[in-house]
Amino acid sequence: MAKIAIMGFGTVGAGVAEVVRLNGAKMAEELGEELSIKYILDVRDFSDSPYAKKMIKDFSIIENDDEVEVVVESIGGKGVALDFTRRALQAGKHVVTSNKELVATHGKELLAIAKARNVNYLFEASVGGGIPVLRSMFQELATNQIEEIVGILNGTTNYILTRMEKAGISCAEAVKEAQEKGYAEKDPTADVEGIDACRKICILSDLAFGKEVAPELVSTEGISNIQRQDVGIAAAAGYQVKLLGHALRLPDGKQAAYVALHLVPENCPLAPVSDVFNAIIIRGNAVGDVMFYGRGAGDLPTASAVLSDVMDAIRHRERRRNLGWSQSADLVAADDLVMRWYLRGDFSLDAAKAVCGEVEELTEGAVITAPMTGAAAKEAAKALGAAAMLRVL
Amino acid sequence: MAKIAIMGFGTVGAGVAEVVRLNGAKMAEELGEELSIKYILDVRDFSDSPYAKKMIKDFSIIENDDEVEVVVESIGGKGVALDFTRRALQAGKHVVTSNKELVATHGKELLAIAKARNVNYLFEASVGGGIPVLRSMFQELATNQIEEIVGILNGTTNYILTRMEKAGISCAEAVKEAQEKGYAEKDPTADVEGIDACRKICILSDLAFGKEVAPELVSTEGISNIQRQDVGIAAAAGYQVKLLGHALRLPDGKQAAYVALHLVPENCPLAPVSDVFNAIIIRGNAVGDVMFYGRGAGDLPTASAVLSDVMDAIRHRERRRNLGWSQSADLVAADDLVMRWYLRGDFSLDAAKAVCGEVEELTEGAVITAPMTGAAAKEAAKALGAAAMLRVL
């Protein structure tokens, strides 16, 4: 019998309890032992809940109960979540989380504590919701040198961009629609400004390359400045506008990571990924491109990933997963990367060619440049008086 | 130091040696010990190979060498591959394979031997080449009841169908092109007739549902009868014609599995999967739909998956993966499943409505029916004198 505690009984925490109820028998069969929720920690009142008897408000009960082997942290943020995670790991308990903010900002420290205490700190659900991308990367693709990661990491903004394209509405209108549907929060800043995607690309990069990338060092652009006409011009020319997180290792060992809008060509498997779906491409030196696709959020998908970590922690009780990242990555600025750029404005094709050299014309006043750095593209945009400038994948 | 032997030095076997050379240092770091190839078994002459000193022709050397912990079977077929696999497992060695024919036909027996000897028999590379789909399913998605699996499991036929659509050529012409490019074998029967896809859907179904599905019981349709006009009509109406393997569990506990051509609607993530790529959707009761995408073949991608199994076997030396399937699945005929059908022929819309009830007209003489069984669709096709009949996903 493996006993767990859930900290935070919101969407994810309640989802974990529900998936244990639904699929606990199958999990027990796989594990060879039963999985049982001993405590649920939440400061709110759940006396009417079927889980009322398990509810507690004092973390030290979990901390001091040797029977509790795995703690699920679904509190969120980096206040008490950080304090409780530190203490649970120090107490020799495995901790599993969906808290991307905490992993992106304090992962290095928490993984070091886990290593010192020989326990697991696992966070599959922090990226891509129910999509098994992190474990595939550190386990299945451990036979590869990872070269590049690029993905649609935030379902809310992908829904908004999809609606702008399909319904021809503005970003503000699509945000409102997403809020009405429950896909965007009342304050949608973390999604719309790319903050959520930034945390996720940091975690992916940390794991893939073994060096810490701090979120505050990652150039992060959201979707709030996107114009519906650019989405339309792109679509007519066979491109989808997507907010991508992108991390890569350069030949000299330096790294880059950023979040920005891109025109994605139709033949890229990220292009058709629409609505709230997430998709992540991982490029390995042996396997080539592998893509993982699914719902990036939601109570049951996220709980499914949390519980796969719980099972993994129990299976690897004695021999912890060798996860961690140490020194800070040597980052180059996103603007130093060479790529193609979309420019749109009140300029002629001849003017664009005079400034940029070879260009591909999408429609009058909208071109895609030859590969150049972001710095060069900004100069070109300025010289042309361009009204819009976007990266091209 | 973990020592392995490779049996069969063809595309996959040589790929395994190459990936060990390329990425061995990273794998050693992950494993905490070095990985070393002790023997390579092949009856052919490789005296000029850099691996000449490791080459042997006598299996009993591997069988009797206690230092060899993991054996990679990349011989193929079910002749000596079956004999050597049985003997290696009996000798207490972990066996890893890319041999889908052997796993689909003898997996139950070989997994039982592995269980009895407390060793692993792993076969990630048998489905989807380098895509980590099997381990994700039995490990990551162990928190789910798997309900359905549907996928593009054969890259050769997907290339052929892509070329028929993009270049407007016939199936025979596209097969020839695939052969010239090295994507199809001289005798392309196993790919073109769906035999390869059938083996893979059997393995997926065996693992997902825990009951054996024998390939000979699976209704298997290839692509040789597909007409270019149907590919064109489908594309114009927003559907891609794909050869899909499909396995599902019905509410009454019975199962179905088959391989057939389908019209796939644009909004399904399988639709844009083109050329030699594979993609597999797994539907779990908690996670919803998750899709895995990548190259389904090739030396390095396949070797990457083989070696992830080798690493897994070494990590789980003492505690074997609890894999296996026992009794035979209770299968319903593919023709009993209710789905929509594409019918094309020299009939009017009114005639189609008179025979099928509600239909969606794609173009003159081509309709999609309301959901009905295959048996009912065949009767309808006969009554209308239809020249083509395809499933709709």
Image (spheres, coloured by chain):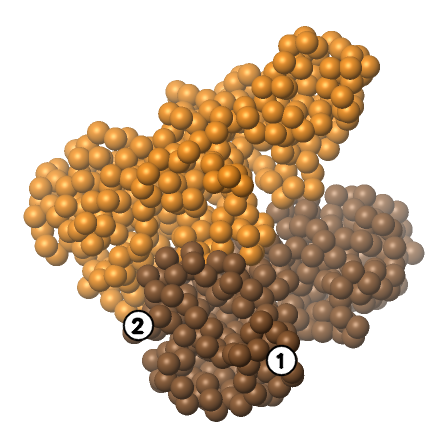
Chain colours: A brown, B orange
Question: Which quadrant holds the N terminus of chain A?
Answer: bottom left
| Outermost right residue | A346
Residue B27, placed above or below residue B52: below
Residue type at mark 1 is: Ser
In the rendering, at what x and y percent does residue A263 appear? 72, 53
In the rendering, at what x and y percent does residue A66 appear? 37, 84
Q: Secondary structure at mark 1?
A: loop
Observer-side mark, 1 or 2, equals 1
Q: Could you tell whether B330 is left or right of A167 in the image? A: left
Residue A36, placed above or below residue A236: below
Residue A212, placed above or below residue A16: below
Front residue of B89 and A369: B89
Residue type at mark 2 is: Arg
Q: Residues within 10 Å of mark 1 (few under 14, many from 20)?
A: few
Residue B60, placed above or below residue A392: above
Q: Which residue is mark 2?
A: A319
Residue in view at x 41 percent, y 52 percent:
B138
